[in-house]
Image: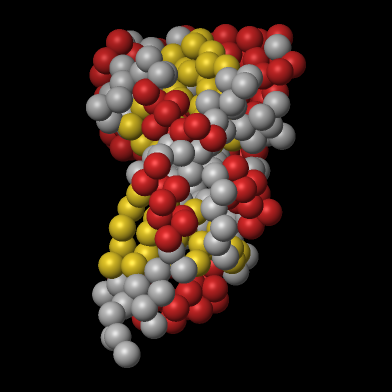
Amino acid sequence: MSNAKGILYIVATPIGNLDDFSPRAIEILKSVDLIASEDTRHSQHLLNHYSIRNTLTSLHEHNELKKSEKLLNHLIQGQSIAVISDAGTPLINDPGFSMVRLAMDSNIKIVPIPGPCALITALSASGLSTDRFRFEGFPPRNQAARQNRFQELLNSRETLIFYESSHRICRCLDDLQKIFPPERKITLARELTKTFETIVYSTIGGIVEENMANPYMQKGEFVILVEGRQISEENDTISPENERILRILLIECSLKKAVQLCSQITGARKKPLYKRALEIEQAEKINA
């Protein structure tokens, strides 16, 4: 009886167009002992399309921890397993992380089978910087939490990438508009690789109006890409939120200390903050 352990394959599947599935991925799904799928009903359509006759088992966010332990036993016993998600690369905002960590800890061989990934597909066509980017997954569902997260990312120099659903796309774009400068570039990619694929290039100030003008742009799956902070933004203007914080600090601190703390809190440059602080103090003296 062989004591050899099985192999865990991480297999990327199409994000829309089934022709994007690689021959290697198809062969792996045909040859493994078991396929762990996020949604077995959804994945069955893919398997049927390529005449893949294999056993499917569910591995999703609600059963991932317990199911991963069971699947690990199969691997230890010498069976090979492929992990797939509903679309794209597993673990990228999809289940599979617990399975991979357990396999690593048990010295199971892990083999990635590359393929489609929505965030990389969108980034490649975004017209935004690709040398440094930051994937944030889905923004918080709660509006206050979502705006707070956008505020934290405001001064990031990387291209920011988010996923969003049709149910929240309008609210999400509206919150982006409230936090980011209107001239900041944004790309909105919808239904990538599918029949009604649409990629919109705009600015933060114009994206809401453009999105609302087209009812089709409120349906489907979205990737939002926001330009990172540019050197051109580092001028003598500061955002309304940064000024609000500066004004609060000026009440309790000296001008120098208020500027220092505001810069630390917001990431804004001290020079425009100092200039604005002087203007605020001068205005208060005149009105006193």
In the image, is 33 to the left or to the right of 46?
left
Taking the view exactly as shown, the residue that stands out farthest to the bottom is 1
Residue 245 picture location, percent across and down: 46, 31
**Residue 102 image-quadrant placement:** bottom left
In the image, is 250 to the left or to the right of 193?
left
**Residue 234 image-quadrant placement:** top left
The answer to whether residue 72 is above or below residue 161 is below
Q: Nearer the viewer, residue 115 or 147?
A: 115
Name which residue lies at 32% across and 90% down: 1
Q: Which of 197 and 143 is in front in this view?
A: 197
Q: Which of 73 and 199 is in front in this view?
A: 73
Q: Which of 70 and 157 is in front in this view?
A: 70
Name which residue lies at 54% across and 53% down: 52
Residue 127 picture location, percent across and down: 38, 15
**Residue 10 image-quadrant placement:** bottom left
Name which residue lies at 65% across and 10% down: 209
Residue 142 picture location, percent across and down: 65, 43
